[in-house]
Structure formats: C-alpha cells, structure tokens
Image (spheres, helix red, strand yellow):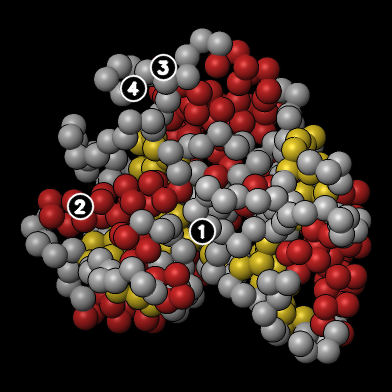
Amino acid sequence: MKANAKTMPPSEPHVMQTYGRVPIALSHGKGCWLWDTEGRKYLDGLGGIAVNTLGHAHPKLVPALQDQIAKLIHTSNYYFVPLQEQLAAKLCELSGLSKVFFCNSGLEANEAALKIARKFGHDKGIERPEIVVYERAFHGRSIATLSATGNPKIQAGFGPLVEGFVRVALNDAAALDEVARTHPNVTAVFLEVIQGEGGINQATIEYLRAVRRICDANGWLLMLDEVQCGMGRTGKWFAHQWAGIQPDVMPLAKGLGSGVPIGAVVCGPRAADVFGPGNHGTTFGGNPLAMRAGVETIRIMEEDDLLRNAARVGEVLKGGLEKELAGVAGVVEIRGQGLMLGIELDRPCGALLGLAAQAGLLISVTADRVIRLVPSLILSADEARQMVAILCRLVKDFLAAPAP
C-alpha cells in the first residue's frame, strides 16, 4: 500500500522530539487493523509495542471501559479500591504468587522491583546491596532502570548512573556462579525471560532453572521482568512458566490493560512483605479504570482462549517466516516464541519501518538489526499469512538492494 507522495507528514512543533516517528498519523482501528488520517489501512504487527492484547476497539472491552468511565476513573489510594483486590487475586491465581502492587507502567514496575531488592538486602543487614543484571537488557528509562539496562547507546548522556549492579551474559550459568562466589552483597537477579528491546533474546529453560537454583542456594530474590513477554504472549500466561519455575518478584505492564496504562509487581512469599506503609506509592497506580481494564482483559483472554491462539498463530507466523526466508543471504536468525518474534538481519534495518508502513504493515526494529513482531493476541492465521507475505517481500528486496 503506497503512501501518497502529496501528503505532508504530520507536524508537531510543540511536542518534544524524543521519538523518530514514521510519518503517518493513525485515526482508528478495528481488530488487528488500523487506518490513518488519510484513509490508508495497515495490518498491525506491532500491537502498540506488545500492549494491545485484544487489538483495537474490541467489542467486549469497549463497553466495559465505557461502563467504568461512567462510574469512577480515579479516587486515590487513600481509600480501598475493590477492583484492585479483584485483579490482584486473579494475577496471584494465574502466577501462584501471593501479593501485588499496582502502578502505571513497566518502568514503574521495574523501579519498584529494584527498590524491593534493595530493601530486602538492607533488611538482611547488607548496607550496599547489589543486583545482577544482563547484557542487552532493557528495563526502562528512569535513572535506576536505565542503569540496570544493558545498552550503552541509550545510557549515553545521562551519567553518572546508579551503582549497585553486576552485569553478566544471558544463558551463562557459570558466570552467575562466579558472581555468587565473588560478590557477597548480591541480593537479587533481575532478568527478562525474553529480552524485547535487546533483540528478542530468550533465556533458555535450562538457564531459568539454573538461576532459580542459584538464587535459592544464595538467598537471593529471583526477579523476572515479564513486562513485554508476559500476559499470554508466548502461549502461557507468563513466559517463565515454560520452565516450570516461579519467581519471587514479577513486574508486569504492557498487555495487562490492553492499551490502558497499567503496571503491576507480583510477589511471592519471600518478597511480598518487604514493602510496608510509606515505603512505596503512586498517585495514579491502581485507579479504577486501569484495574477494570486489567480485569476485563484477563476475562476476555480466558473466554476467547487467547493463550492457545497466541501459540497456534505464532507457529503459523514463525513457520511462514522460516519458509519464505530460508537460505536468504543476510537473514541471520528467526527467533522467539508465540506472538513475540524477531528476525535478525546482518545489517542495520531501521529503514524497514517506513518501507513496511508504505506497504501497509506496522512493525518495529530493535537492537538496530532485529525486526520485531508483537501483534495483538487476537491475530488470525490468515492475518499472520498476510504479514508473512508483505514482510518477506520487503526483507528480500531490502537485502538485495545495493548498500547506500
């Protein structure tokens, strides 16, 4: 689908230029499709960056949110919010954990997790607690979460970073054993089960089990960042469940509210009571609208069997990509699980964002060379095949073109 060359890109003279935007402005959506203000139609392979679990304008979600807006949007945490307990109970049921703190975003959830790890250490008499983090990790853009992130490019210009982090390579259990031997102040291990911004890099089942064992042996908290890979995206409620383990701390966000801003930190018994009154808080977190969005998202996911759909359609999508791109020079690897997939190329490919949009497909590129697909969990097999057809043609043309 070609963009109209006569159409001027949207202008934003009063908005801080913190994003490199694709020059389209979206107007409305339905299911896995979006339309821009010029009437052009796009297949949404990005899902709001793994946020729009139920797609756009879901016929079960919209009336529920309209109902909630007509009742209460915000009250504050001075008072009980019954929907908080309802959503917390459901998250504990699905995860096997015991208590939840609600906030507004993945960054806030990860920030809370870091505070839990530090206070857990202080409560044990460790004056300067340390947290194990990972190469190529991404946990957010606040100063603390930026410090935990493993990307020098986005850290540049914001030093001095927060101290207290020990960085290791993913899927290297020996490196973690060495940290246990040489760093007596470590209190927690903090990792993404699948690194999203880092390039769709998966922690192996064997590694996750090893990390759980090492944490238990050393009295550390295991903190699994499921902000992007959780909420059914891989075909289970949480990606770590494929390994048959449980974390002590699990930050969630993105897909939990199907587009309504929400974050959560779900904790097991070792971490559930680390925070007491006054240790942490938020004005907007846990507001009735966000809680209703979370409750309804999970209800609809269960009713419509979206975990099974994510696994089944994810196989169609990944299988189609593997078939069409097999043997194509410049394609390094196709990886991921469910509806969280990455196609690594041998060169930077940021130009594919605009090219894909011109062809009627919305994607992202992360870690410079990895095409990321994180569509809504309602994606159909037919839509997955359409995505494969559009994207593979673009990738082949891109790789065949002479270097600029």
| Label 2 secondary element | helix
**Residue 66, image x, y percentages:** 62, 17
Residue 318 falls left or right of residue 138 = right
Q: Which residue is mark 2?
A: 120
* Above or below 33: residue 77: above
Front label number (1 vs 2)? 1
- Label 1 or label 4, whichever lies nearer to me, is 1
Labels 2, 3: front one: 3
Residue at image coords 33%, 31%: 283
Q: Which residue is mark 1?
A: 18
As shown in the figure, which amino acid type bears the numbered disc 1?
A: Thr
Left or right, residue 116 beside residue 320: left
> Which badge, 1 or 4, comes first in the chain's sequence?
1
Q: Quadrant of residue 264?
A: top left
Secondary structure under the numbered disc 1 in the rendered image: loop
Residue position for label 4: 76
Labels 1 & 4 near each other (Cβ < 8 A): no
Q: Secondary structure at mark 3?
A: helix
